[in-house]
Image (cartoon, helix red, strand yellow):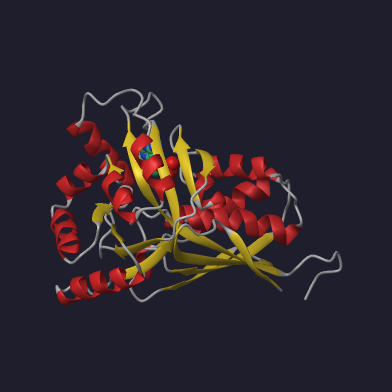
Amino acid sequence: MVTALGLPLSVSVRGAAKINLHLGVGAVRADGFHPLQTVYQAISLYDDITITSHHYTGIVLETADYIDASDVPLATHNVAIRALEMIRARTGREGHEHLDLVKSIPVAGGMAGGSADAAATLLAYDRLHGCRLSDDALLELAAELGSDVPFSLIGGTARGRGRGELVEPLDDRGTWWWVAVPSATGLSTPEVYRHFDRLFPNALADPAEPADLLSALASGEPLRLARSLHNDLQSPAIDLRPELGTLIGLGEGEGALRGLVSGSGPTCIFLCDSLDGAHAVVAGLRGAGHDVVLIANGPVAGAHLLERS
Ligand code: C5P
């Protein structure tokens, strides 16, 4: 169905989880953020947002069985609601919209689930109302909402600089297979960064360029990529949650090419040589008592339209 202006009544957009193939962190800046040299990849775990013109603004949540719905902030604490309010103000519109959010990306897991929801909301709002904001205008709003939100808009594999908000797509023709193990309890991103500051008081002002990772990515070889994966937030995350170190050792023992903490954690991700290899790692981890073990591949698209109705 469409309105008299030819606009849809509701729009659904899908947003993807992100992982960091390289996360180089520098010394904290005066504004409290850390300078980053990162390489993001969007992987096939998704949140879907449907936005509908309504007489009040609200949000209805549905979650995958491994997500505790009470962990998802609602009302104005939800970054999707903040995204909605921001784009409404930016486009000078009045009115209300209702959001239906179907979450499969682990919450507070270091996979940018909130950023995926914010990016999806910006795109859905733009299409619902025919705003036609330019890509640059959407990226600017995204950067205001959070460091990872611009990447969540563009997806694929991309370099991130600044505090992560300056993104540049990379040519990545590989198909990379990942196993992801979320934790029942999330980790606070600011807390992990603060612990990084405590552990590395002499961190460089500018983190090094991810040269090894970029050449491994271009080679398309899983083993080379495995050797080049790097995350400066891994040791602070493991220091706060020692069981993550044990989990990484376990996944590698079960045949993963390499395991590492995803972003600020606590989700751990394991690069595998193939889909079959990923199934073998899943079986091993389940056998060792990890009930929630997910398979995903990347790179996949960032926020993209699913449906208009
Ligand atoms: O930008 P975002 O809202 O996702 O950041 C959440 C928090 O993570 C920040 O308030 C900051 O404490 C930390 N952070 C940081 N350096 C970055 C990105 C995030 O210190 N580059």
- 2 sits left or right of 119 in the view: right
- Identified at 34% across, 41% down, the residue is 23
Q: Nearer the viewer, residue 85 or 285?
A: 285
Q: Nearer the viewer, residue 248 or 32?
A: 248
Q: Residue at x 38, y 55 (%)?
A: 111
Residue 181 appears at what percent x and percent y?
27, 64
Residue 126 showing in the rendered view? yes
Q: Position of residue 162 (x, y in %)?
A: 45, 32
The quadrant in which the C terminus is found is bottom right
Q: How many labels were placed on the picture?
A: 0
Q: From the viewer's perspective, is 215 left or right of 27? A: right
Which of 207 and 165 lies nearest the eye of the viewer?
Answer: 207
Among the 4 quarters of the image, the one containing residue 45:
bottom left
Viewed as shown, does residue 15 lie left or right of 242? right
Answer with left or right where residue 262 lies relative to residue 40.
Answer: left
Indicate the quadrant where residue 233 lies: top left
Where, by quadrant of the figure, is residue 71 drawn?
bottom left
Q: Is residue 202 above or below residue 53?
A: above
The percent position of residue 257, horizontal first and vertical second, equals: 25, 58
Tell me the quadrant of the picture where the N terminus can be found.
bottom right
Ligand 1 occupies quarter: top left
Task: Name the residue: 39% across, 41% down.
Answer: 215
x and y percentages locating residue 242 in the rendered image:
13, 52
Q: Please report the residue visible at 18 percent of the width from the left and 60 percent of the height from the top.
A: 252
- Asked if residue 76 can be seen in this view, the reply is no
